Image (cartoon, grey):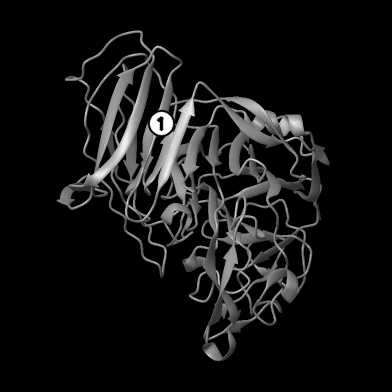
Amino acid sequence: MRFLSSAIALATTAALVAADSCTQISGNYYCNAATAIEYENVGFSGSYTDVTSMDDCSCSTETRSFSGSLAPFSDDLSVHFRGPIQLKQVSVYTSSSESSSKMKKRDAHLHLHERQHAVQHQKRALEVVTEIVTMVQTIYYNPDEDATSSAEPSVSTISVNTASSEAVVAVPVETTLNFGAPTTDISVGPSGSVSTSAATTFSVSTTSSTSSSSTTTSFSSSSSSTSTSSSASSTTTISTSDWSRTAQYDSSSGTQSGITFLNNLGGTNGSGTWSSCWGNSLSYCNSDGETAAASSQVLGDVLVGSNTEFIMFSDTECTTDTCGYYRDGIPAFVGFSGDMKMFLFEFQMPSDSSSSASFNGDMPAIWFLNGRIPRTSQYGTCSCWASGCGEFDAFEVLSSGSNYMISTLHDEQGGSGGGSSDYFVRPTDSTMKAAVIFDGSSSKVFLVQLDDATDFGGSVSADTVADWMSSSATVVSLSS
């Protein structure tokens, strides 16, 4: 969670009959509420800097190569939670990679994510418009620390003015968004102030079509490449094998299997270690979700407060063969590996406006990291994180008190991964059930809000997962 201090301007859309708008809160843009977000074409061949030793305050590394579907997210992943959050249950599943094709319905409407990512939403009209929009993108990133504000978020809204657009009613449209040569960058600050500098022109044009409506988006810049395409229906490949549960936690029954909960409080309560060079290591998490313990504990049915984190690994202890290097004297466990894995969550993120936390107050999150990161130094400088070994923010609140949970994939694919400015609504008053599906057979990562009656059973049928992955979704396509 090191990308909290980013600010960029909105990529406006080719406006249709009822123009959508995106809202800026503390430098981040939020567009439409979503119940599913799909990342497609996930995985590439690359490398990252892997830690091999942390002895004598010296961080030694070597280059580690990877390739294949979902890579590097096929590595073992740890699951991270930040309060205020109450985790009610979680189940982890795996499947073989047998696959088949399935027709999927898609929405089509265009936005640009705040971190150089293009995505799709529903097209709400059948009117043709043509316009050129110059857009903006400025990223502020401090690699050494998160930067957030505990002040009330300032809000501004940007929408498209179509007064001068030419329209033809009742004709399906095809929309193409091309990111062209450098021209002028308009930087919109958190207070709404505007400044200009060299950047990129984005051309939005819309033309009529007699076939089913569709949308194609391409994006290129000096640092990243993300494209999004969508149509009324499309074909995808989905696993045809049932999914078997390998790990489970249930707060109501006080049971867990195949899971170890940890946190970053090493050197306290007889767990983990601390050094002046690298700070706190991993430690066992106590049942309260907030302190360390001397041995593995079952997480209680507890509400974990603001700016408090705990981590979920499997219950398989590490060896150098399974985990690579990890700090001496820590509880080291394998994360969740492979390119066919699924996580079902039930959680609540209640408001915590009275929090005394001076940092990350009332900003809950659920995210995934390459397991090598926390086993070395999650918030320090000696880990593979900076070289792009993988972080996936599944449900992240970016500003204090916000009810918007966004999703972003961080690695080096296309330069900087991808993400969406569409959001899931934060479950403040009741629990939410959701699935995060890493499906290597289709090279997709799929997030979907589930029905409240969904059962986290010992297995989930291939048809059920296929139906989830066929939900109408915002689509983020990563470049090869």
Instruction: Tell me the kind of residue under disc 1.
Output: Thr
Relative to 317, does residue 449 appear above or below in the rendering? above
Q: Residue at x 76, y 74 (%)?
A: 319
Indicate the quadrant where residue 289 lies: bottom right
Q: Residue furthest bottom?
A: 56
Q: On the rendered structure, is 340 left or right of 191?
A: right
Seen from the viewer's position, the closer of residues 386 and 275 is 386
Residue 180 position in % (x across, y down) = 26, 42
At horizontal 22% and vertical 22% (from top left) the residue drawn is: 162
Which of the two residues, 151 or 245, is positioned nearer the viewer here? Answer: 245
Q: Name the residue under label 1.
A: 216
Vertical placement of 249 versus 129: above or below? below
Q: Position of residue 475 (x, y in %)?
A: 50, 35
**128 vs 6, nearest the viewer:** 128
Position of residue 245 relative to residue 126, above or below, is: below
Asked which secondary structure carries label 1, the reply is: strand
